[in-house]
Image (spheres, helix red, strand yellow):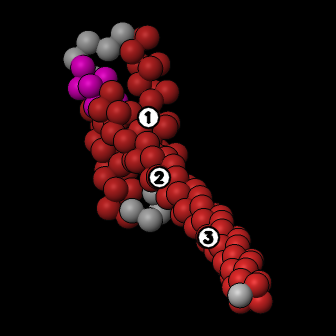
């Protein structure tokens, strides 16, 4: 009976050791998968942030002419332009002329800015 109990004890000890090794390997594999997943998620979120920043800059670039052109149209349409307003208008007219060249990807927008600039200059010089 002592031999049988020793054999059972040895098998239990071997089984525990084997279970511990398997458990340890599971922990290591799980940690490696978790680290790899975190790295992939970080890269994806960084890419998404970069795309968001690019989109934000592009939208700001597209809204800027709208504000300048609106101010320019108001100044050109004003019936009573004093010297100060004339100087302001001249400063504002230069910006859309330069800005039109920066919109090569958007030919219709570029042409619209040019047309509006031309019409504003006509109004300005009629006053």
Based on the picture, tell me whether residue 74 belongs to the magenta stretch. Answer: yes
Image quadrant holding the C terminus, namely top left
Dot placed on the residue nearer the N-terminal end, 3 or 1:
3
Q: Determine if residue 25 is in view.
A: no
The percent coordinates of residue 31 (x first, y second) are 66, 66
Q: Is residue 65 above or below residue 105?
A: above
Q: Residue at x 26, y 25 (%)?
A: 74
Location of mark 1 (residue): 93
Location of mark 2 (residue): 52
* Camera-side mark, 3 or 2: 3
Which mark is drawn over residue 79? none
Q: CA distance from mark 3 to mark 1?
A: 63 Å
Q: Nearer the viewer, residue 28 or 62?
A: 28
Which residues are the magenta region?
72-78
Q: Secondary structure at mark 2?
A: helix
The percent coordinates of residue 96 (x first, y second) are 44, 42
Q: Secondary structure at mark 1?
A: helix
The percent coordinates of residue 46 (x first, y second) are 58, 56
Q: Residues within 10 Å of mark 1 (few under 14, many from 20)?
A: many
Dot placed on the residue nearer the N-terminal end, 1 or 2:
2
> Is 13 on the left-hand or right-hand side of 126?
right
Q: Is residue 46 above or below residue 1?
A: above
Q: Residue at x 43, y 11 (%)?
A: 84
* Camera-side mark, 3 or 1: 3
Q: Residue at x 26, y 12 (%)?
A: 80
Location of mark 3 (residue): 30
């Amino acid at each position: 009976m002592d031999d049988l109990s020793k054999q059972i004890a040895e098998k239990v000890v071997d089984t525990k050791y084997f279970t511990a090794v398997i458990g340890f390997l599971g922990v290591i594999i799980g940690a490696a998968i978790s680290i790899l997943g975190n790295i992939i998620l970080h890269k994806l979120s960084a890419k998404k942030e970069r795309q968001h920043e690019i989109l934000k800059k592009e939208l700001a670039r597209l809204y800027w002419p709208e504000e300048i052109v609106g101010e320019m149209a108001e100044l050109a349409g004003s019936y009573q332009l004093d010297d100060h307003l004339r100087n302001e208008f001249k400063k504002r007219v230069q910006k859309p002329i330069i800005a039109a060249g920066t919109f090569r990807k958007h030919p219709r927008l570029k042409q619209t800015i040019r047309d509006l600039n031309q019409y504003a200059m006509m109004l300005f010089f009629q006053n």
